[in-house]
Image (cartoon, grey):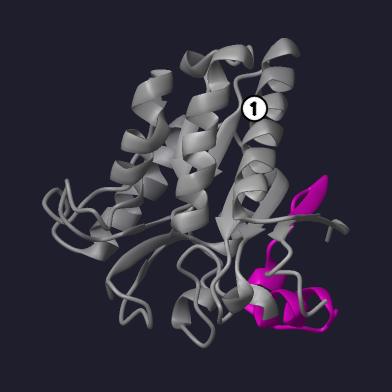
Amino acid sequence: MSPSVVEVHDDAEALATSVAGALLSRLAAAQESGGEPHVALTGGSIAEAVHREIARLSADSGVDWSRVVIWWGDERFVPSGSPDRNADRARSDFLDAVVATQVHEMPSSDVAVDAESAAAAYGETMREQGGGEFEVVMLGLGPDGHVASLFPGHPALDVDDRITVAVHDSPKPPPERISLTFGALNRTRSVWIVASGESKAEAVAAVLGDETSDLPAARVAGREDTVWFLDVAAASHL
């Protein structure tokens, strides 16, 4: 497991700006080296703030968005156009604005018959069009320590023979979801965990303060590094 680096920012706004700037710098550097970086995105309120900052800062970043491949760490299994879909929010927040052209959305419930078939289809797409590993996997953190849609105590935690898994009876609505497995999430150069607010402080402390933690967030790590981007509130129990 790679060592964890912790960055603490004054507030959610400063946090979002820092993460957006770091991602743009990382993508530009990868492209300057001749690469076509693959990135896995997440949803949630702080992710939406990060995405809006990416849109604001992108013009001066040097990133060619036609050469960035976008994936998702998880998705809510709901119809296309639903405000619950991470992909739809990301498109409105920044993907359309930067004209990203290689965007791989997880199937919606009006395309796939069930979450299992949606997960299987996304896994097949990743096998056919994935780059072997991600440049960055960006993850939010739940108050219970979950990442992507891998929740404490759920059967999906133990799936190790697939890229993707269907998640049922999620403790956080909507109940039907699709998630990358730990095996897929950890095929990355860097894992970035982004957490904002007092409600995340206990989970942050439980993972970073206990090397034996079995919370889902403790089971993700990048090959090169694992960075925790926090605001003061989220870091308040460290």
Residue type at the position of mark 1:
Leu
| 126 is higher (above) or lower (below) than 62 | below
**Residue marked by disc 1:** 24
For the N terminus, the quadrant is: bottom right
Horizontal arrangement in the rendering, residue 216 relative to residue 170 (left or right): right
Q: Report the residue at 53% width, 35% height from top.
A: 53
Q: Report the residue at 74% width, 64% height from top.
A: 232
Q: Report the residue at 68% width, 69% height from top.
A: 234
For the C terminus, the quadrant is: bottom right
Horizontal arrangement in the rendering, residue 72 relative to residue 225 (left or right): left
Number of numbered discs: 1
Q: Report the residue at 27% width, 70% height from top.
A: 176
Asked if residue 225 is among those painted magenta in the image, a careful observer would answer yes
Asked if residue 203 is among those painted magenta in the image, a careful observer would answer yes
Q: SS of the residue at dot 1?
A: helix
Q: Quadrant of residue 207?
A: bottom right
Picture coordinates of residue 41, whole percent (x, y): 50, 45
Picture coordinates of residue 13, whole percent (x, y): 60, 48
Tell me if mark 1 has few (under 14), some (14-19) or many (20+) residues whose alpha carbon lies within 10 angstroms of its own: some
| 146 is higher (above) or lower (below) than 187 | below
Picture coordinates of residue 11, whole percent (x, y): 66, 56
In the image as oriented, which residue stretches furthest toward the bottom? 153
Front residue (pair 158, 206): 206
Q: Magenta residues, as a range? A: 202-228
Q: Quadrant of residue 202?
A: bottom right
Horizontal arrangement in the rendering, residue 176 relative to residue 215 (left or right): left
Picture coordinates of residue 37, whole percent (x, y): 61, 26
